[in-house]
């Protein structure tokens, strides 16, 4: 569809993940050392619906992820993920896309610098024809051994080469 929005502009919209503003929902997969505190700060739209994602202090890579719900295989397709992030002090996390299952995983990510102001971060990936599973978006701590906290709101995954305007998705 197409719509106008102050959270990404005017134009195409799509969101093929669920619970885009509810990171503590069961639709999100969290590693054992990742926790979510719901509704902990004001989101970009002014409502208190942004969540705190905490990656614990350990040597493993901690993450939160969700696989697309449209059933389209990742192979030979391009996907773009986006999410609004900030925190009370600057920090670094990774935003990425990977195949959800099967053989050698195809995974790509970008290290992003989160500031004290809300910013919408985007990342795109084109899968090879050999990719397996469905596209899965993720946020991780980049393997940091220090605890990392980040406020998150408005996650989105689209089968497009660029991010469209933000589209809320419920359960």
Image: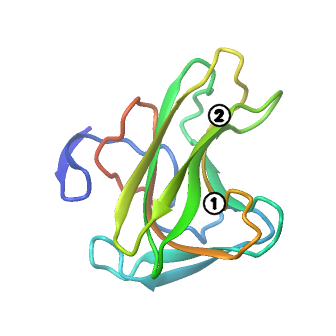
Q: Nearer the viewer, residue 44 or 150?
A: 150
Q: Position of residue 150 (x, y in %)?
A: 53, 72
Q: Position of residue 79 (x, y in %)?
A: 49, 33
Rendered residue at 31%/41% (across/down): 164
In the picture, measured across the screen, residue 57 lies left or right of residue 8, that is right
Q: Is residue 53 above or below residue 88?
A: above
Rendered residue at 63%/60% (across/down): 28
Q: Which mark is residue 134?
A: 2
In the picture, measured across the screen, residue 43 lies left or right of residue 150, that is left
Q: Which mark is residue 96?
A: none
In the picture, measured across the screen, residue 150 lies left or right of residue 33, that is left
Q: Nearer the viewer, residue 83 or 135?
A: 83
Instruction: Find numbered disc 1 in the image and state the secondary structure of the residue it sits on.
Output: loop
Q: Is residue 120 above or below residue 39?
A: above
Q: Quadrant of residue 142?
A: bottom right
Rendered residue at 81%/68% (across/down): 32
Is disc 1 surrounded by few (<14), some (14 to 19) or many (20+) residues within 10 Å?
some
Of the image marks 2 and 1, the number of the one nearer the N terminus: 1
Q: Position of residue 120 (x, y in %)?
A: 36, 56
Q: Position of residue 108 (x, y in %)?
A: 62, 37
Is disc 2 surrounded by few (<14), some (14 to 19) or many (20+) residues within 10 Å?
many
Rendered residue at 74%/59% (across/down): 143
C-alpha gap between disc 2 and disc 1:
15 Å
The colour mode here is: rainbow
Instruction: Find numbered disc 2 in the image and state the secondary structure of the residue it sits on.
Output: loop
Outermost residue on the top side: it is 129
Q: Check disc 1 and report the residue beneath it.
A: 28
In the picture, measured across the screen, residue 138 lies left or right of residue 34, that is left
């Amino acid at each position: 569809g197409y719509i106008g929005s102050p959270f990404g502009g005017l134009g195409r919209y799509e969101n093929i993940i669920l619970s885009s503003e509810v990171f503590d929902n069961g639709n999100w997969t969290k590693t054992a050392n990742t926790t979510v505190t719901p509704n902990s700060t004001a989101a970009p739209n002014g409502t208190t619906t942004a969540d705190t994602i905490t990656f614990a202090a350990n040597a493993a890579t901690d993450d939160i992820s969700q696989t697309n719900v449209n059933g389209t295989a990742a192979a030979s397709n391009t996907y773009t993920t986006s999410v609004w992030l900030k925190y009370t002090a600057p920090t670094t996390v990774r935003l990425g896309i990977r195949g959800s299952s099967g053989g050698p995983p195809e995974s790509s990510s970008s290290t992003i610098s989160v500031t004290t102001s809300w910013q919408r971060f985007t990342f795109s990936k084109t899968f090879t024809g050999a990719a397996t599973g469905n596209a899965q978006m993720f946020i991780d701590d980049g393997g940091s051994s220090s605890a990392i906290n980040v406020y998150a709101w408005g996650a989105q995954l689209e089968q497009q080469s660029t991010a469209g305007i933000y589209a809320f998705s419920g359960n």
